[in-house]
Image (cartoon, rainbow, N blue to C red):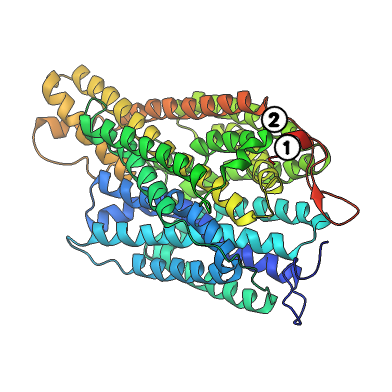
Amino acid sequence: MYTKQQAGAPAGGPVPSQSVALAAMMFAVAMTFIDQTIVSIATPDIVDELGLSSSGMQWVVNAYLLALAAFFALGGRLADLLGPRRVVVAGTLVFVVSSVLCGCVPRGDLALTWLIVFRTTQGLGAALLFPAALAVVVAVFPVERRGRALALFFGVTGALTALGPLLGGWLTDWTWRAIFWVNVPVAVVALILTALAHVSDRRRDEPLDVKGAALIAIGMGASVLGFQQAAAWGWGSVLTWVCIVGGLAVLWLFCRYELRTAHPLVKFAVFRDRAFAVDGLVLFFAMLAFVPLFFFASVYAQVSLSASPNQAALYLLYFFAGFALASQWGGRILDKRGARPALKTGCVVGAVGFALWAGKLTDLSMHDQWPYAALAGAGIGFILAPASTDAVNRSIDASYGEVTGITQTIRNYAASVGLALFGTLLTHRTTDNVRDTLESRGVPSGVADGAARNVAESITGSADDRQLTGDGPVARTVRESVSAIRMDFAEANQWVFYGMAIALAVGYLCALRHPGGTTGAETADGATEDRSHTADRPS
């Protein structure tokens, strides 16, 4: 039977406030979503003040996403073992302390190491926080209201990503360090609301799978390292493939180990549910585009469109206008018809939007691109909330922490891989285009290739042309070719955006395999079952 205790009420204590608990969890998670986009806007100022290299700055961005991917499964499991409220509080504190320390980074040789370390611990805090926050929402809402609550949770927190570019542009005008410090008041509000919500903790008396946690962290870290460094090491480098293949091999060992252990970090039985597996695949291909878009679109706006950080933030708002509208629409489709139509619609709309947007990048007009940016955003909006909610609703043994750990691991690993792969593609295409431009202006082939590499690393790493300076005939040619180089960079970005369109097209093929139907129907005795595809449920 469904009881108040199961809904998160403390035994003999006050019944938790559902609205306050939902608000508290959305405030807490808002920090993690905003942080995914706010740093990209401030990238030029961070690089300029601290003197970072382009590859170093990419690691500052990627360290956060990598830590998210590596530790989400651990965060979900800890929420089950220690209680979601405790883990929310711990994750919030780790995240906000790391944010303050990121903002206090000293100048000098220590700067890069400092930022990477505390961006990593930020990601660890977020990985603890998100699955625990979702488990709190699930715990305090009865099953007949849970679907609407989850749709609101995913829709609003996803839309909050739009605040990152806006806050980033505004705060960077004061100091880029404020993009990290802004998390402090948000965390304080989240912790106060969490205390006021009176949410109790339900814990499982089971051991933590430490070996599994280590295997998944190593496997994901090594594989993403290979993807990330492919641009610097080269795809022909043995080291690149040792990292990629070795990391994937460790992940395969992790899967084998989890299937044999008595108390696994991840219960792979959930993938017997075909709908859950399809939700995960669609989320993977959608996230290849979603989070990397913020970095690449911001860099494109500041390089090719000569936009300021504030203007780049407004450019990204076109995308989020479509995202916000489609998220609400997708939630209604999920409630009435299930996830399948929302996923199919989102993949088609997103693929078309990204393809049309790619075609307009070389017009170098922000105004002409907004319909296609909004269309691409709408596609992602149709996907994220329905796929995430449907996956959670199909969880096994009511272990929402574990299931959220799985889906968020998929999402953030995809984001890390997408950032690495598309970053490599962008650097290579920019190098080729700039080399051709310099050769056409009389620069010898060998010299043009080296100069083109420097230019590509400069503008893809720092999002502007501040490093396009120097003495000598080659440097003068580069400065005189700035207009052509801006177009070269726009053409290179077309490859990235077409790649995002292809990712969503593959997502559509996966969505066709979704069995359809809705979840969360309540039976007479209060248990929850999925009447639409019971045969697909894991035993």
- The quarter of the rendered structure image containing the N terminus is bottom right
What amino acid type is highlighted by mark number 2?
His
What is the distance, in whole Å, between disc 1 and disc 2 at their CAs? 8 Å
Q: Name the residue under label 2.
A: 514
Farthest right residue in view: 524
Q: In this view, does 532 lie above or below 398?
A: above
Q: Can residue 30 be seen in this view?
A: no
| Side of 206 where 389 appears, left or right | right
Within-10-Å neighbours for mark 2: few <14, some 14–19, many 20+:
many
Residue found at x 80% / y 56%: 143
Callout 2: SS? loop
Cβ atoms under marks 1 and 2 closer than 8 Å? yes
Q: In this view, does 105 lie above or below 218?
A: below
Image coordinates of residue 266 in percent, x first then y, are: 53, 48
- The quarter of the rendered structure image containing the C terminus is top right
Image coordinates of residue 370 in percent, x first then y, are: 58, 36
Residue found at x 58% / y 66%: 205
Q: Of the two numbered discs 1 and 2 on the same chain, state the one appearing first in sequence.
A: 1
Q: Mark 1 points at which residue?
A: 339
Callout 1: SS? helix
